[in-house]
Structure formats: structure tokens, C-alpha cells
Image (tube, rainbow, N blue to C red):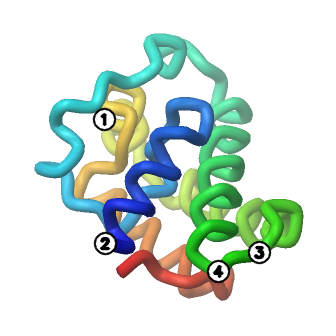
Amino acid sequence: MRLRTFLAAGFLALGVTSALAGASSSQLEAYQPDPSLRSAPTSELETRVRRACAVVQARMQNAAETSFERPCGCYARTTLRSLDASEIAAYRTTGYFNDSARAKALGAIDSCKLQRPV
């Protein structure tokens, strides 16, 4: 149930599913990514990841989104800086992290002291 809530929150967060580090790619196959992702600058990707993270963490922890600005900023920066060009390209195409990027995102969740999705 938490995974479904997590997925729904991610979809609501500006149409971005990038904070879905714990989600399986097979669960997201029907998702249609925002076409602007293909040409968005990296700073916009980071903003989207940060926003989606704050929405998801706030719902998971029953807290205000604003209380996650700093840790979700850490998560977004750490995750995007760890991705290689092919992982970013895959994210731009699909709107979610592929398996190798997901592993890096989970590491960022831990290092930024956020709650992992169940």
C-alpha cells in the first residue's frame, strides 16, 4: 500500500516520478513522461526531483513538505550528480530512474537521511 501511495505522490509531483527510487520499472511502464524532460536543463531536473521527493516524504512521514526542503535538495543533488549520461538520457526518455540509476538514488536516500519507500 505504501508503494502505491508513493507512486501516486510521485506522479502528482509535477508529473515527475524521479523520486521513485524504490519503485520497480515494470510498475511504471504505462506512465507517460512530461515531454519537456527531454530538453530540460539539469537544474530543472534537479528541481523536479527535489519537489517530488518533498511530496513523497511528506506523505510517507505525515509532515509538511517544507520540512523536507533541505534533505530532498541533498537527495536531488546527490542522485543527479551520481548518474552517468546514459542514466540521465534514460530518465529523460522514460520519466523514471532505470535500475542502475535507482540503485544510486537509494544510496542518496540513505546518505541524505530520508525514509526509504517500502
| Residue behind mark 3 | 63
Q: Which of marks 1 and 3 is nearer the N terminus?
A: 3
- SS assignment at label 2: loop
Q: Position of residue 98 (x, y in %)?
A: 26, 50
Separation of disc 3 and disc 2 at Cα?
A: 18 Å
Kind of residue at badge 3: Ala
Q: Which of marks 2 and 1 is nearer the N terminus?
A: 2
Q: Viewer-nearest of labels 1 and 4?
A: 4
Residue occupying the point 56% across, 84% down: 115
| Residue behind mark 2 | 1
Kind of residue at badge 2: Met
Residue occupying the point 61% across, 85% down: 111
Q: Earlier in the sequence, mark 4 or mark 2?
A: 2
Q: Which mark is residue 90?
A: 1
How busy is the neighbourhood of tag 1: few (under 14 within 10 Å), some, or many (20 plus)? some
Q: Where is residue 80 in the image (x, y as percent from the top left)?
A: 56, 52
- SS assignment at label 3: loop
| Residue behind mark 4 | 61
Q: Earlier in the sequence, mark 1 or mark 4?
A: 4
Residue occupying the point 35% across, 81% down: 118
The image quadrant that residue 42 belongs to is: top right
* Disc 4 and disc 3 in contact, CB within 8 angstroms: yes
Above or below, 29 against 117 in this view is above
Give the position of the N terminus as an image quadrant. Answer: bottom left
Above or below, 104 against 41 in this view is below
Separation of disc 1 and disc 3 at Cα?
A: 32 Å
